[in-house]
């Protein structure tokens, strides 16, 4: 009985496979929206022809070096200039310290109407010293108004001639006075004894700024003979 049932079933399956009765699965189409591509990339702008470029040259500041200006032991306050530009004052024992741009410069100090100068080359990170003391001693000689005995000699039997030089290194005209004293010994004609004496006098001169004046005068001495003179001295000096 079972065999009878299976035979018809096998026959039916065979027919289906043979005749292509098996239906194919139908694909349902899916409607997709149309998408239009959009370019979102922003190209680089060519600024070569649209924006002018200006070349700017920057000059770095010059380097400075250290400079010390000294007048040593010269007893004065002297103005200092560099390349004809005033930069300060140098004093006795107090040099003037400066920072100066690299290169060649002319340094000058002036005492009244007389000036001394030196050339100097400034370099970065190197100190240079300019000392004017030797030049001032040689050329100016006196830092302040002064008087000195320039010469002296006997003149006849009753006088001694003394020459006084007045020096005015300042920037003002001055009236200068000096008291001169000359000590001496001689033999008195009446006692024939050697005795001491002193001759004195006051010399005065009007001296312009930066100038010198020589004044010569005679100092009277006591009567006698065999004179021995000491070197005359200036015992008092004044200006106004």
Image (cartoon, helix red, strand yellow):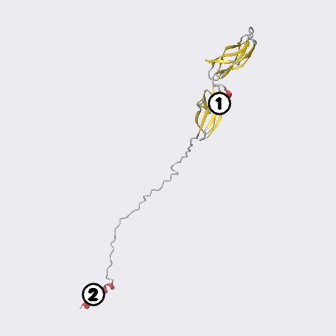
User: Relative to residue 92, is residue 191 drawn left or right?
Assistant: right
Provide the secondary structure element on which disc 1 rests.
helix
The disc placed on residue 133 is 1
- Mark 1: few, some, or many residues within 10 Å (few <14, many ≥20)? some
Where residue 213 appears, as percent x and y from the top left, is 68, 19
The residue beneath circle 2 is: 9
- 86 or 170: nearer the viewer: 170
Q: Left or right: where does residue 116 sit relative to residue 228?
A: left
Is residue 72 shown left or right of residue 188?
Answer: left
Above or below, 181 relative to 55: above
Figure disc tally: 2
Q: Quadrant of residue 220?
A: top right
Q: Position of residue 11 (x, y in %)?
A: 29, 88
Farthest residue to the top: give it. 190
Residue 24 quadrant: bottom left
Q: Closer to the camera, 14 or 140?
A: 140
Q: Quadrant of the N terminus?
A: bottom left
| CA neighbours of label 2 inside 10 A, class few (<14), some (14 to 19), many (20+) | few
* Label 2 SS: helix
Q: Position of residue 45 (x, y in %)?
A: 48, 53
Question: Disc 2 vs disc 1: which is toward the camera?
Answer: 1
Q: Nearer the viewer, residue 57 or 233?
A: 233
- Give the distance between the C-alpha atoms of the residues marked 2 and 1, in whole angstroms: 142 Å
């Amino acid at each position: 009985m079972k065999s009878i049932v299976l035979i018809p079933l096998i026959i039916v399956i065979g027919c289906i496979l043979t005749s292509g009765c098996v239906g194919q699965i139908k694909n349902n189409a899916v409607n997709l929206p149309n998408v239009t591509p959009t370019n979102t990339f922003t190209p680089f702008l060519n600024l070569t022809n649209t924006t002018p470029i200006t070349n700017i040259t920057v000059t770095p500041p010059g380097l400075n070096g250290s400079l010390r200006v000294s007048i040593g032991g010269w007893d004065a306050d002297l103005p200092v200039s560099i390349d004809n530009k005033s930069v300060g004052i140098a004093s006795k024992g107090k040099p003037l310290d400066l920072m100066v741009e690299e290169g060649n410069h002319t340094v000058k100090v002036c005492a009244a109407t007389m000036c001394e100068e030196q050339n100097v080359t400034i370099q970065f990170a190197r100190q240079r010293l300019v000392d004017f003391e030797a030049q001032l001693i040689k050329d100016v000689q006196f830092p302040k108004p002064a008087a000195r005995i320039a010469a002296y000699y006997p003149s006849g039997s009753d006088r001694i001639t003394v020459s006084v030089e007045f020096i005015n290194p300042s920037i003002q005209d001055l009236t200068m006075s000096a008291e001169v004293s000359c000590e001496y010994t001689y033999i008195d004609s009446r006692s024939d004894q050697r005795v001491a004496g002193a001759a004195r006098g006051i010399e005065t001169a009007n001296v312009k700024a930066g100038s010198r004046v020589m004044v010569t005068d005679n100092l009277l001495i006591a009567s006698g003979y065999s004179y021995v003179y000491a070197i005359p001295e200036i015992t008092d000096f004044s200006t106004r």
